[in-house]
Amino acid sequence: MITILVRLSLLVIIVALLWNWDGFWNTDIKFLTDTQKTYFPIKYEAEHLKIAALYERSSLFTKIKEKIVKYEQEKNQSLNALHAVEEELVAVNKKATVLLRHYDTSLRIINQLRRKFTPDEFEETLKCNSAECENIIKLSPEADPETYSFQE
């Protein structure tokens, strides 16, 4: 009597495990699939809908991961472009600093020459052939280093 109860309990446990195991309902064994469709059509459909939903979610997660990878690549490209622009800005800033130092030095030399020479001697000593040079010598507002634009 106890062996029958043990066997019956074991059978119930096995059936319960199979009943709740997704692989049991998603099998390629034709006999088992036909039996499931015939005797348990509602459970069979419910399990297959659940499996279809899992596949759909899986593909959705895959698409989301692909978008994340794409956006990370775009972000990295943007950061690389930003880094390149920052390097270019540093180079231009260094060049402008050097030009401004030369410009400032030129203005100081001109001021020293103005003190040393009379206005007529100064004009005779320094002769310019460009408008920028004339602006610098006359110390006009266009020669202000804060507003001056260097053109190459």
Image (spheres, rainbow, N blue to C red):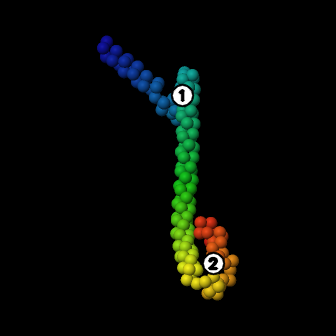
User: x, y (%) of residue 42?
Assistant: 57, 22
Quarter location, residue 96: bottom right
Left/right of residue 85 with respect to residue 9 in the rendered view: right
Q: Residue furthest top?
A: 1
Q: Which residue is mark 2?
A: 137
User: x, y (%) of residue 113?
Assistant: 56, 82
Q: Residue at x 55, y 58 (%)?
A: 82
| Distance of label 2 from label 1 (alpha carbons) | 92 Å
Q: Residue at x 57, y 33 (%)?
A: 52
Q: Which residue is mark 1?
A: 47
**In this orientation, which residue lies closer to the viewer: 56 or 19?**
56
User: x, y (%) of residue 100?
Assistant: 55, 71
Q: Residue furthest front?
A: 118
- Depicted 12 relative to depicted 114: above or below: above
Quadrant where the C terminus is found in the figure:
bottom right
Total of numbered circles in the picture?
2
User: x, y (%) of residue 101?
Assistant: 53, 73
Q: Secondary structure at mark 2?
A: helix
**In this orientation, which residue lies closer to the viewer: 93 or 49?**
93
Q: Secondary structure at mark 1?
A: helix
**In this orientation, which residue lies closer to the viewer: 140 or 77?**
140
Q: Residue at x 52, y 65 (%)?
A: 90
Left/right of residue 9 with respect to residue 73 in the rendered view: left
Whether residue 38 is visible to the viewer of this picture, yes or no, is no
How crowded pointer 1 is (Cα within 10 Å; few <14, some 14-19, many 20+) is rated as some
Q: Which mark is residue 147?
A: none
Task: Tell me the kind of residue under disc 2.
Answer: Ile
Q: Residue at x 56, y 80 (%)?
A: 115
